[in-house]
Amino acid sequence: MSSEKTKIKLNFQEFLQEILTNPAKLHECYNYFWSYSHRNKLLAMFQMEKPEPINTYKGWQALGRQVKKGAKAITLTMPIVIKDENKDGEEVKKMIYVPKNYWFKLSDTEGEDYNPMVQVPQFNFELALEKLEIKQIEFENCNGNMQGYAQPTLKQIAINKLAVNKLKTGLHEIAHCLLHGSDPLLGDGAELDKSVKEFEAESVAYIIMGQLGLDGLEYSRGHIKAWIGNDGNKADLTEKNFTRILGACDKIL
């Protein structure tokens, strides 16, 4: 794709207006999995060779995956409120944690590849990683709702095998590597708070997806609005952020 095609006509205010006024959705994929307590995350990791998404038997079935015959369930604790008596004989309620072996890890399941990455004739994701010297590593996290993550200082990204839009997720994580490492290519991102970093990374994904003519922009707008608020004032955004975003888009394209 020529550099001319990456020159975005929108200015910063027009871009914000597009994000804040066009239809936006938050994808239901963020609620496919339970949100596990820190205690249960540790319990799960003790029972796995490496961290990976976990779900119940029925949870995996709802995602179109079947637990393999003979797979051993992971035990987590479930909070239950029971009635008891205190030393004065008064009825009180207290929380106890009961172990339940209901959960299975992703590698315990089988099924077709979940939402394979969209292939675009004019864009090669693997080549972009190679040219930008960014490495894709295996996704290692118990939270199946997490679509992916980046390790900017190491220039590494990971994409969840269950991500709903692997290309958008990959572009988002590449943007983190370009913009938010300890030695970033496009400026000092060390002082940016999380909402600004997420705005920058998702805006890069949004613009590139638009340039490539891909579907799903309403979900990207929903992601951006969740971080900056419905009026755009939740995060401290300036024209400089937009300049950084466009610079990252040019490098990726």
Image: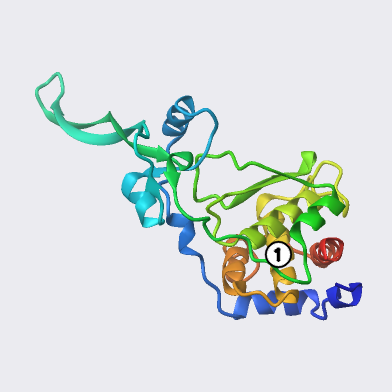
Residue at the outermost right position: 3
Frontmost residue, 89 versus 93: 93
Image coordinates of residue 98 in percent, x first then y, are 26, 29
Residue at the outermost front position: 69
Q: Quadrant of residue 156?
A: top right
User: Could you tell me which quadrant the N terminus lies in?
Assistant: bottom right
Q: Is residue 230 above or below residue 100?
A: below
Q: Residue at x 50, y 51 (%)?
A: 145
Image coordinates of residue 27 in percent, x first then y, are 50, 64
Frontmost residue, 243 versus 185: 185
Q: Quadrant of residue 240?
A: bottom right
Q: Is residue 33 above or below residue 118?
A: above
Q: Is residue 234 visible?
A: no
Q: Residue at x 53, y 34 (%)?
A: 51
Q: Is residue 204 above or below residue 129?
A: below
User: Could you tell me which quadrant the C terminus lies in?
Assistant: bottom right
Image coordinates of residue 41 in percent, x first then y, are 46, 33
Instruction: Name the residue carrying label 1.
Output: 205
